[in-house]
Image: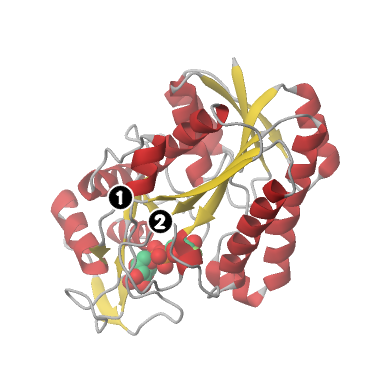
Amino acid sequence: MKKILITGGAGYIGSHTAVALVDAGFEPVIIDNFSNSDKSVLSGLKHILGKDLSYYEGDCNDSTLLNKVFSENDFQGVIHFAAFKAVGESTQLPLKYYSNNIDSLLILLETMAAHGVKDLVFSSSCTVYGQPDVLPVSEDTPRQEAESPYGNTKKICEDILRDYIKSGVNSRIISLRYFNPVGAHPSGEIGELPLGVPNNLVPFITQTAMGIREKLTVFGNDYNTADGSCVRDYIHVMDLADAHVKALAYLSQQKDNFYDLFNVGTGNGNTVLEVIQTFEKISQLALNYHIGPRRPGDIEKVWASTEKIQKVLGWKPKYSLEDSIRDSWNWQQKLGEKV
Ligand code: UFG
């Protein structure tokens, strides 16, 4: 069976991608240091898949460990999720972000080369676009100066991959620029597990409805959007997971020395207030929220052009915003009041 290494495979997007890979006939192998994930994810995966997945516990910037993992497995490819991702923390601890996110990519590339593994899918982010002048934002849109060290690590990693391929190596690499991942596996066995107070909108909504948080603050209602709150492109995590499977399949058909990048979003923008209304409709609950000041560094509006990924990878989203919110709420209800 075709083995795929998933770095950060116990995380939110990694764990859902593990399910999508098994469904597509791959055998995922996880490496995770559990710094921002929980081992309970592995039992959630077992419930869904009916079997244990192999995993290694440790850092993927530990070159000795990574070499051992590659020696013990014959990988067809790698999906590199493992990275720190808290925007706010990255402004306080930039070196932590630069060293972890960049070193792990460099060490991974070296290890892949040493073991003759060519195919890599890299987790990038729509953060590289900043506030685009034209919407929807396409892959040709010039990137902007990053708003945070976290965002800058994504830009730098994209540049590393581009330059690496330019140097003539035989690797084949795709960067996927994620928009806003939401939702959970429809079984409710795995989902987003933020440690501590969530930064992101949807877990904050579901935790507020569950009584874990007192109230949600909507960060600003004076933006130039339909109802004044910010607009994002919310994509179901299973659709996002599927994009990785399509990216791997596409890579396997390319000639050596290949690099490309794709947006992964739905192509639709929704405001914060629309997300709240959708949640209230699905859950039949009134959410405790109020309008607060803008959050520094927030982008007013961004949503993806999905033309390229639809045309080239043959991928398109299957889930609606309602589906995403339903699955997030189902997951939160299964979790109960655990944080
Ligand atoms: N929001 C609120 N209240 C909250 C949390 C969020 O109103 O308590 C709003 C934000 O202001 C924003 C929207 O909900 O308008 C979405 O916010 P998230 O924090 O969920 O997502 P962001 O789009 O800000 O951040 C995401 C990723 C980051 C990435 C960023 C860049 O989480 O990793 O996109 O595009 F850097």
Which quarter holds ligand 1?
A: bottom left
Residue drawn at the location 49% of the way across and 58% of the way down: 125
Residue 176 position (above or below residue 77)? below
Q: Can residue 102 be seen in this view?
A: yes
Among the 4 quarters of the image, the one containing residue 254:
top right
Instruction: Report if the CB atoms under discs 2 and 1 are less than 8 Å apart.
Output: yes
Report crowding for label 2: few under 14, some 14 to 19, many 20 or more residues within 10 A (C-alpha).
many
Type of the residue with mark 2: Phe
Q: Can residue 198 be seen in this view?
A: no
Pick the front one: 216 or 315 = 315
Residue 154 position (above or below residue 228)? above
Residue drawn at the location 53% of the way across and 57% of the way down: 195
Report crowding for label 1: few under 14, some 14 to 19, many 20 or more residues within 10 A (C-alpha).
many
Residue drawn at the location 71% of the way across and 21% of the way down: 74
Ligand 1 closer than 8 Å to the CB at disc 2? yes
| Residue 18 on image: x %, y % | 51, 31
Residue 36 position (above or below residue 310)? below
Quarter of the image with the N terminus in it: top right
Q: In this view, does 8 lie to the left or right of 60?
A: left
Residue on which the image places disc 1:
266
| Residue 258 on image: x %, y % | 61, 40
Residue on which the image places disc 2:
179
Type of the residue with mark 1: Thr
Q: Residue 198 carries which label?
A: none
| Residue 150 on image: x %, y % | 59, 66
Identity of the residue furthest to the top in this view? 1
Pick the front one: 312 or 304 = 312
Q: What element carries label 1?
A: loop
Pick the front one: 70 or 54 = 70
| Residue 64 on image: x %, y % | 86, 39
